[in-house]
Amino acid sequence: MRKNNSLKLIVIPVFIFLFLPLFIIIVTSFGEKPTIQFPIEGFTLDWYANVFRVGGFLDSFWLSLRIAILATLLALLVGIPAAYAISRYKFPGRQVLKQFFLSPTIIPGVVVGFSLFQFIVITMQIPLFTGLLLGHFIISLPYIIRVVGSSLEQLDVSLEEASWTLGCTKQETFFKVVLPNISSGIYASFMLAFINSFNNIPVSQFLTGPGLTALPTTLMSYIEYNYNPTVSALSVMLMLLTIGLMVLIEKTLGLASIS
Amino acid sequence: MLNRKIPYIFVTPGLILLVVFLILPLVSIIWPTFYDGAFTFSNYAAFFDSSFNINIMWRTVKISLIVTLWTIVLGLPTAYYIAKANRKWRSLLMGLVLFPLLTNSVVRSFAWINLLGTNGVVNRILLAVGFIDEPIKMLYTEFAITIGSVYLFLPLMITTLVGILENIDEEMIEAAETLGANPWLAFIKVVLPLSIPGVLVGSTLVFTGTLTAYTTPQLLGGNQNMMMSTFLYQNAMTLGNWQQSGVIALIMIATTIIVMNLFNGIARVLDRRGGDLNA
């Protein structure tokens, strides 16, 4: 017990450090003054209404949502078979391939963004939406390979063997035995990749154009020119979104599965 | 016959997409930095010849190092506390740590604009208590980037460490305390050495994360305190100097790989020494 008490001397300040800045954002979102201040004067919900009116936040939100869902689905479509091949088949180059599929994590986000901007948008003239989608696909793929891969490692191969012995083809076994058994891994990797894509800045920052700007990029450029509680209000809404996702994960898999 | 082809069929779509949309673009930005009618290293020589560029590199490495150390100092005791708490308490605390981790980094950097600005919370408090006579400049400084980055990466360090610290046998600490070590000494002599593998994993993530982070230096550092990633962005999008951007990109990739291998190497050496002790 004494041990815990002396540790609290660090732990309590750490949690204050983690939450006080967010708490201040929440409070400032209700202030009446057109510039952010703390403590606030008066009380208003106008800034929340403002989020829907200015800065193109709403359009950006839908774009970010679409990109995150599509990129993650594409990553699942491509990543699940790859993870399956890597964990279930012995073939030359298996380890190298696994490292290769995880390699987007060692390339800095701004480098991925810049190279895609130059290659896809400038050189190949591919539409921006496709470029954004591909960029987010690339940063999502490692999550799928890693999380689905480890689900597959944990799944007993004898289950599949039993299914083959009982007359199922390889395809039937994959869809009836393997897929249902790794569904929680697929779900966890989807959530991780989705959150990561939705929050991504460095890649989106380079792939932006008229009417096609991801939400974090819109918010970032808004902050650079404006300092009013609209930013606080949108921040609070994003925090609520995070809480919503966390509750969803906790109710289904338990938060432990993604940490 | 078909059986042997199956794994290759399964990996092919991913392989093609990564080659075309990751590797080719990388080659297309890095190739021109070496080839200008003939092979040349002059772009790199020129880059390292400028004290302005060296300053940015040095600032990036320095801030990454300081941030890593702070996340260890603050993260280790916190992670230990969480790992040893009872089950209900632990999942609550883990949820609290995960929340900032999953919240957009623009929001988390914006939080520090409110705190550190000229009219920000910290200046107002310091003025109110008469500690200072006029606001001090904290925003758009290296200090702002550092504290913002510690704030950004501390949850990552804590979640990485909790996983490792959970596996430390409680009885070892009890043994140390029975043998007369006070809780802090037991922490330093028992928990600290056993947590080193986790600290190395966490440090790799935090160091390379700070090294390549874009949002925090952009929002809290301003133009006077660029880091490698904001410097790359400025060169690519504002100045249109793509050759220099390619040079910065390769330096960033190389630094990331060097740092990862360095930390892995340290982990391996320590592992071997641990093995020898047991033998």
Image: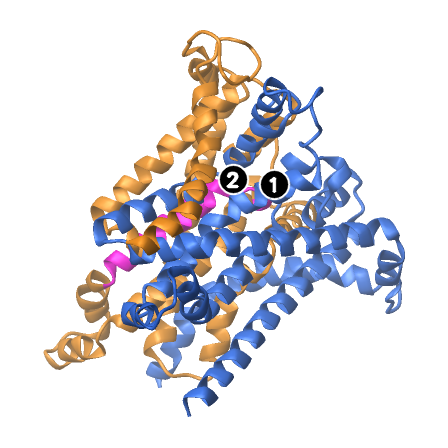
Amino acid type of the residue tagged 1 in the rendering: Thr
Crowd around label 2: few <14 · some 14–19 · many ≥20 (10 Å): many
Image quarter of the C terminus of chain B: bottom left
Dot 2: element = helix
Q: Residue furthest left?
A: A166
Q: Which chain is orange?
A: A
Residue A31 point in image, percent of width and height: 47, 12
Disc 2 target residue:
B105
- The numbered disc on residue B216 is 1
Q: Quadrant of residue A221?
A: top right
Dot 1: element = helix
Crowd around label 1: few <14 · some 14–19 · many ≥20 (10 Å): many
What residue sits 32% from the left and 63% below the top?
B166
What residue sits 70% from the left and 54% below the top?
B62
Q: Quadrant of residue A227?
A: top right
Query: Magenta stretch containing residue A197, yes or no?
Result: yes
Residue A161 point in image, percent of width and height: 18, 80
Q: Is residue B96 above or below residue B181?
A: above
Q: Earlier in the sequence, mark 1 or mark 2?
A: 2
Residue A218 visible in the current orientation: no
Which residue is at the front of the view, A247 or B152?
B152
Please tell me if label 1 and label 2 are on a single chain: yes
